[in-house]
Amino acid sequence: MKNSKLKPCRLSASVANLLGLPAAALTPGAQLLISDTEHLWFDSVAGVAIWQREGLQQGFPADSLEEALARVRCDNVG
């Protein structure tokens, strides 16, 4: 994560499918940040985030996108 710059991306069914996110990821409160090597999905209604990089996917609770991003930057998602 240290060298990667996550940027907002519009979440659509085709993007979710390409990233391996389930159809349930397409919620009104969902936000997506992506880079060349990873992505961070966050749902504000459910308070859940999913971070994926290099074939590893980790889900974790988060109260905000900012909190989820901070946890990813600190490798504190477990």
Image (cartoon, rainbow, N blue to C red):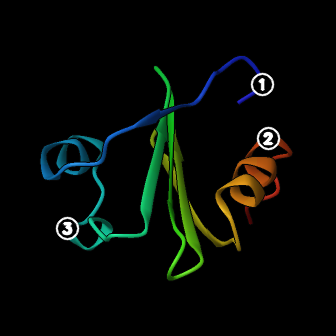
Labels 1 and 2 touching (C-beta < 8 A): yes
Return the x and y of residue 61 as percentages of the image width and height. 66, 76
Return the x and y of residue 20 as percentages of the image width and height. 28, 51
Return the x and y of residue 8 as percentages of the image width and height. 48, 35
Please name the amino acid that badge 1 sits on: Lys
Tell me if mark 1 has few (under 14), some (14-19) or many (20+) residues whose alpha carbon lies within 10 angstroms of its own: few
Please name the amino acid that badge 3 sits on: Ala
Labels 3 and 1 touching (C-beta < 8 A): no
Label 3 or label 1, whichever comes before in sequence order:
1
Label 2 or label 3, whichever comes before in sequence order:
3
Q: Is residue 37 left or right of residue 64?
A: left
Q: Identify the disc placed on residue 73.
A: 2
**CA–CA distance in space, label 3 to label 1:** 29 Å
Q: Quadrant of the N terminus?
A: top right
Q: Quadrant of residue 65?
A: bottom right
Tell me if mark 3 has few (under 14), some (14-19) or many (20+) residues whose alpha carbon lies within 10 angstroms of its own: few
Q: Residue furthest left?
A: 14
Residue receiving disc 1 = 2
The kind of secondary structure element at disc 3 is helix
Residue receiving disc 3 = 23
Q: Identify the disc placed on residue 45.
A: none
Please name the amino acid that badge 2 sits on: Arg
Q: Nearer the viewer, residue 50 or 55?
A: 50
Return the x and y of residue 2 as percentages of the image width and height. 77, 24
Q: Residue at x 79, y 54 (%)?
A: 71
Label 1 or label 2, whichever comes before in sequence order:
1
